[in-house]
Structures are given as structure tokens and as C-alpha cells.
Image: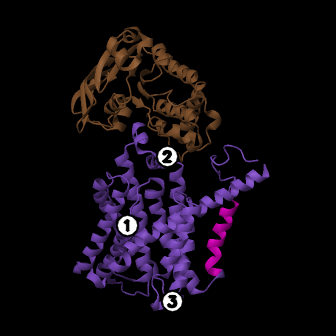
């Protein structure tokens, strides 16, 4: 029987099937590269991990805290450039470069966030979009870091863990990506159940009410932006070490910022697994269109993304995870 | 506890508050009345930092709170509800109340347990797992009250606590406000229901077109000529 409250009661993890699906998923992720040894399939999974991590960060600033940033590529690019530049020019291990990238991203996030997070609604989105474009232009014209050509990371065969380069197999990169993604998911899980998550969601839902209850809007919005920047920077560093050649068009484009928005919207905004589900759906489509259309194409994946987003927005505004919740409620109601 | 000193606020050519002056003593209930557009909610916004006054001062516990942000004012001990209800719709009723509590407790479990006490107080404990967007207007009013109480204010500003709810719910909300006073919370109450206001308030401020036209005990306000003309009507004379 459908009760009055059936659509408004929360779906608990128990109703989502408990921990069993999570354990099965973890086991599947761990054995995957040994079962599917095909390099291309592993490549797609690595890209899902990298973009999924970046989208997880965007989900925190936008999905949980309600601030739509369209400039996350700034931090992806900073992460990519930090590791690449330090390794190519000074031989510094990308692991240190990764931390340096996070530090620079945090400083830049504060610099951007302090003035722009005061803006409400679309104005913050517009400001981050414009700053993202400016950043790309700066890097295109900044010869010291390679200008429009970018940076070619020197190929190193010995000591792959120091150089964060694995030329014999994609498996180490796969597990590194998986570890970072798992870390991002674990952080989101913890955050959702902490004061931080409570405050973020309160700011998203009703900033005035949150403020009237003692929540410092500026402080917590900035914190969310810094977390998102950290995730994007870590993803950018991994991307650079995986691809080994970066330029401003690859790591700073607006399209990248838009792509992670689409991933999160598709999977489920403000849902822990939403960005990962979105990445897992959209990236294979992107890869498939790239392979199928090759150099003749270029925007087919975007057309498919657009179509999916329209369908999801109209019929399932809470994304694929919202759809799953709805199906579970329907099952529960049918059973009761 | 609260002293409002010659507060002025205008929006363009509209004078929303003009030389408003009154005091609220600890433990009392002050009523604020006036027709729509009289400047009552603006007064709340000025006291709680959502708007900045053009001139004048607001003292809380003897210190000026002018220029502070709403969250800073709340942490000093002033809570409020809104005329246009502002629940956190995508959060559960329990989580709504926990937001106000987190400045006082460090553990989520502790906050959850205390939230249950406030939800019992307002009669919403059976709705604690429901998303706030699924509540009726009367339930949302109770939720706003519980949420504001959870920030443990010394002074609570309630904006039309009985507005828009059915007649059956009004006495329940009135008894909640009475219990607040019993438990030592000072209350400033904007209220259109005169029966409710006159039974609860120790003092009443009457506003009309942004001006303070009267301040006194409920009986005095009921007999005040200008208040009768501009707001109460002849039946209260």
C-alpha cells in the first residue's frame, strides 16, 4: 500500500540492499584487470576512476553545498601541470608534485573562492566559467610552462613507482586510480555523516536559514570549494602521469568542466555514488564514439550526453541513483 | 536583554522602519503587530543581521550587534523563524533540527539524541525520518520552531508562528510558545492573531507604514486610538 509518506521517507542503506552489493562491487573492481586483460578495457576503467574522482569533488561543492562551479578544470590543470613541470624540469617525483599541485590548487581556490562565493545562484557559475577560460589563456601564453605546446613528460623505464610511469602494464595505474577513487568515496561517505555534510546540505537547501542557525556561509562554502579543488588536482596529476603529455587544451578546457557536471547530473547530484555511476556510463560512450567515428567525428558523444541529460532531467531529476531509490520504494510499497 | 534604538531602514523611496525604539526584558514575551507592509519582518531582519540599518543601533545583553553577520548573531544567542518558511527540504526532519545543534555539541549521535527531545517538544518525533518537503504547513511551523530552539537561543524571534495553519493547530502552537517562556526563553513574536497575541504578550509594539505608533501593555494597545484606526478596527475599542 502506498502511504502518504512513502515518497518523503529516506531510503536507508538497509533498504538499498545492505553491504552485500558494496562487497561484491569491491571484489569485482579488485579482480577486474586480471579477468579483463585487454588494454583498452583497462584504459576505459582508468579514465572512469580519474574523471570519477574529479566528479566526486564537484559533487561536494555543487551536489552537497549547492554552489555550481564551472571552473573545475582549473584545478585539474594545476594538478597536471604541477607534477609534469616538476618532474620534467627538476626530476621531482610526481608523488611530491601531486602534493605540490594540491597546495597550489588550495591557494588558487581560496583566491577564487573568497570573492566569488559571495555571489549567489548563477553568478558564481558564470564567474568560475570566466576564470577557467582566463586560466587556460594564461597557460597557452605562458612559455615557461610550455605555452600552447604544453609539457612532454620524459619517459622513464627504471624505477616506475618513483616516476609514476608504468609502461609494461596498465594494472598499477588501474589500482592507483581505484585507490584514489575509493579514498574519494570514503571521504564523501564520512562527510555526509558529519557536521560538515550537514552544514553543506543546509547551505544548499536554504542559505538564509542555515545562517540563522549559526552556520558561517562563507567559511563552509570555501571549504567545499577547497575540497573539490583537491579532488580535481589529484585527478589532474594522475591524468598527466597516465597520458604523459599535457597542454592547456587538454587539461584546462571548459568542456572538461562541463563533462564532470554532466557525469554527476546523470548519476545523481548530491548522491555519494552519483558521479562514479555517471562517469561509468558517459566515458564508455565517449570512447565508443571516438573509436567509431574517429577523426571525422568530434561531437557525437556530446549529442548523446545531451540526450541523456534531457531524459534524466525531465523524468529522473535525481539521476540514475534517484531512479534506483524510486524503484526500491515501488518494490517496498508493492510488498507492504 | 534586547534594546532597539531609533532604528531606520529604507529600500529606495520606501521607509520600512523609522525611528523604532523599544526594549525587551529577560523572560518576557513582546508582541509586534501591524498591517501587512508595516515593517515587522524588516525589523526582524535588522535585529538578526539579514539587513543593515541606515541608522540606529541594536544592543543585545548590553553590547551592540550592529554589523555582525546572521550566524554570528545566532551564536551570541538570538534565534529566529521566518514568515516565509525556510525548512531544509532535502534533509530529514531530524537533520533539520541537528543543524542548529551542531554549534553546541561535537558528536553527531549526541546531536541526534538532543534533536529528538526538541522534536518531542513540538510533537514531530514520529516524523523525524521524513524529508522536510513532505511536511504540511503546520508541521513546518513546528519544525522551524524546533530548529530555532535547537540553536539554544536566549532570545527567540518568531515570525507569524500561527499564520497559515488550521484553527486546530493554533492552540498547540500557542502552548509551545508558553512553554518556551516557562523554560526561560525570551520571545519576540510577530502575530496577526490578536487573540493569541493578547493572551501571550507582556508588552506590544505596534507598527504602521514603518513607524512605531504605540508601545505598551496589551490592554493599553487595545485601547490605543491610532492602533485601532490603523489595524485593530472598531471591534477592539
Callout 3: 10 Å neighbours few (<14), some, many (20+)? Answer: few
A19 in magenta: yes
Location of residue B198 with respect to B34 vertically, above or below = above
Cα gap from disc 1 to disc 3, whole angstroms: 38 Å
Q: Position of residue B35 (x, y in %)?
A: 38, 25
Say which residue appears at 57% left-offset and 39% top-offset. B94
Chain letter tied to brown: B
Q: Which of the two marks, 1 or 3, is nearer to us in this view?
A: 3
Q: Earlier in the sequence, mark 1 or mark 3?
A: 1
Q: Chain of mark 1?
A: A
- Chain rendered purple: A
Is residue B138 at least partly visible in the picture?
yes
Characterize the local packing of mark 1: few (<14), some (14-19) or many (20 or more) Cα atoms within 10 angstroms.
Answer: some
Q: Which residues are magenta?
A: A18-34
Q: In this rendering, do the residues under marks 2 and 1 share a single chain?
A: yes
Disc 3: which residue: A293
Residue at mark 2 shares a chain with residue at mark 3: yes
Dot 1 falls on a residue whose secondary structure is helix
Taking the image as shown, residue A73 lies to the left or right of residue A319, namely: left
> Which element carries disc 2, helix, strand or loop?
helix
In the rendered view, tell whether residue A36 sits above or below residue A271: below
* Residue A99 disc label: 1
Residue A198 disc label? 2
Amino acid at each position: 500500500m502506498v502511504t502518504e509518506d512513502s515518497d518523503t521517507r529516506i531510503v536507508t542503506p538497509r533498504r538499498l540492499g545492505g553491504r552485500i552489493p558494496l562487497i561484491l562491487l569491491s571484489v569485482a573492481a579488485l579482480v577486474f584487470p586480471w579477468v579483463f586483460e585487454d588494454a583498452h578495457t583497462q584504459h576505459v576503467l582508468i579514465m572512469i576512476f580519474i574523471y570519477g574522482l574529479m566528479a566526486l569533488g564537484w559533487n561536494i561543492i555543487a551536489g552537497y553545498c549547492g554552489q555550481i562551479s564551472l571552473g573545475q578544470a582549473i584545478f585539474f590543470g594545476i594538478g597536471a601541470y604541477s607534477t609534469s613541470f616538476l618532474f620534467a624540469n627538476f626530476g621531482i617525483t610526481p608523488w611530491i608534485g601531486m602534493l605540490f599541485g594540491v597546495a597550489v590548487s588550495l591557494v588558487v581556490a581560496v583566491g577564487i573562492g573568497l570573492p566569488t562565493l559571495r555571489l549567489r545562484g548563477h553568478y558564481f557559475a558564470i564567474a568560475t566559467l570566466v576564470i577557467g577560460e582566463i586560466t587556460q589563456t594564461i597557460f597557452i601564453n605562458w612559455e615557461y610552462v610550455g605555452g600552447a605546446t604544453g609539457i612532454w613528460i620524459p619517459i622513464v623505464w627504471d624505477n616506475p613507482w618513483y616516476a609514476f610511469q608504468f609502461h609494461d602494464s596498465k594494472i598499477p595505474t588501474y589500482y592507483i586510480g581505484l585507490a584514489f577513487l575509493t579514498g574519494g568515496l570514503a571521504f564523501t561517505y564520512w562527510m555526509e555523516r558529519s557536521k560538515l555534510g550537514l552544514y553543506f546540505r543546509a547551505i544548499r537547501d536554504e542559505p538564509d536559514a542555515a545562517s540563522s542557525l549559526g552556520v558561517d556561509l562563507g567559511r563552509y562554502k570555501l571549504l567545499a570549494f577547497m575540497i573539490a579543488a583537491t579532488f580535481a588536482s589529484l585527478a589532474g596529476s594522475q591524468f598527466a602521469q597516465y597520458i604523459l603529455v599535457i597542454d592547456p587544451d587538454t587539461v584546462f578546457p571548459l568542456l572538461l568542466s562541463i563533462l564532470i557536471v554532466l557525469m554527476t547530473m546523470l548519476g545523481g547530484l548530491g548522491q555519494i555514488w552519483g558521479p562514479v555511476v555517471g562517469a561509468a556510463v558517459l566515458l564508455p560512450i565517449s570512447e565508443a564514439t571516438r573509436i567509431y567515428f574517429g577523426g571525422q567525428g568530434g561531437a557525437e558523444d556530446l549529442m548523446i550526453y545531451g540526450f541523456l541529460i534531457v531524459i534524466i532531467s525531465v523524468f529522473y531529476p535525481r539521476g540514475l541513483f534517484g531512479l534506483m531509490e524510486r524503484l526500491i520504494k515501488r518494490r517496498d510499497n508493492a510488498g507492504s | 536583554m534586547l534594546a532597539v534604538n531609533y532604528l531606520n531602514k529604507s529600500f529606495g523611496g520606501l521607509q520600512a522602519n523609522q525611528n523604532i525604539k523599544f526594549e525587551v526584558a529577560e523572560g518576557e514575551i513582546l508582541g509586534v503587530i501591524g498591517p501587512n507592509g508595516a515593517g515587522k519582518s524588516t525589523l526582524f531582519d535588522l535585529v538578526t543581521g539579514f539587513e543593515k540599518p541606515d541608522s540606529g543601533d541594536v544592543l543585545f545583553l548590553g553590547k551592540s550587534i550592529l554589523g555582525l553577520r546572521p550566524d554570528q548573531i545566532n551564536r551570541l544567542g538570538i534565534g529566529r523563524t521566518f514568515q516565509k518558511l525556510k525548512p531544509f527540504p532535502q534533509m530529514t526532519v531530524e537533520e533539520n533540527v541537528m543543524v542548529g545543534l551542531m554549534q553546541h555539541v561535537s558528536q553527531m549521535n549526541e546531536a541526534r539524541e538532543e534533536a529528538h527531545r526538541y522534536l518531542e517538544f513540538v510533537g514531530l518525533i514520529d516524523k523525524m525520518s521524513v524529508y522536510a518537503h513532505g511536511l504540511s504547513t503546520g508541521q513546518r511551523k513546528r519544525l522551524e520552531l524546533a530548529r530555532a530552539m535547537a540553536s539554544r537561543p536566549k532570545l527567540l524571534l518568531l515570525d507569524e508562528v500561527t499564520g497559515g495553519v488550521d484553527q486546530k493547530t493554533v492552540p498547540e502552537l500557542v502552548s509551545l510558545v508558553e512553554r518556551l517562556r516557562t523554560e526561560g526563553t525570551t520571545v519576540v513574536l510577530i502575530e496577526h492573531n490578536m487573540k493569541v497575541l493578547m493572551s501571550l504578550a507582556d508588552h506590544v509594539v505596534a507598527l504602521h507604514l514603518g513607524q512605531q505608533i504605540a508601545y505598551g501593555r496589551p490592554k493599553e494597545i487595545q485601547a490605543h486610538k491610532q492602533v485601532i484606526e490603523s489595524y485593530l478596527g472598531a471591534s477592539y475599542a
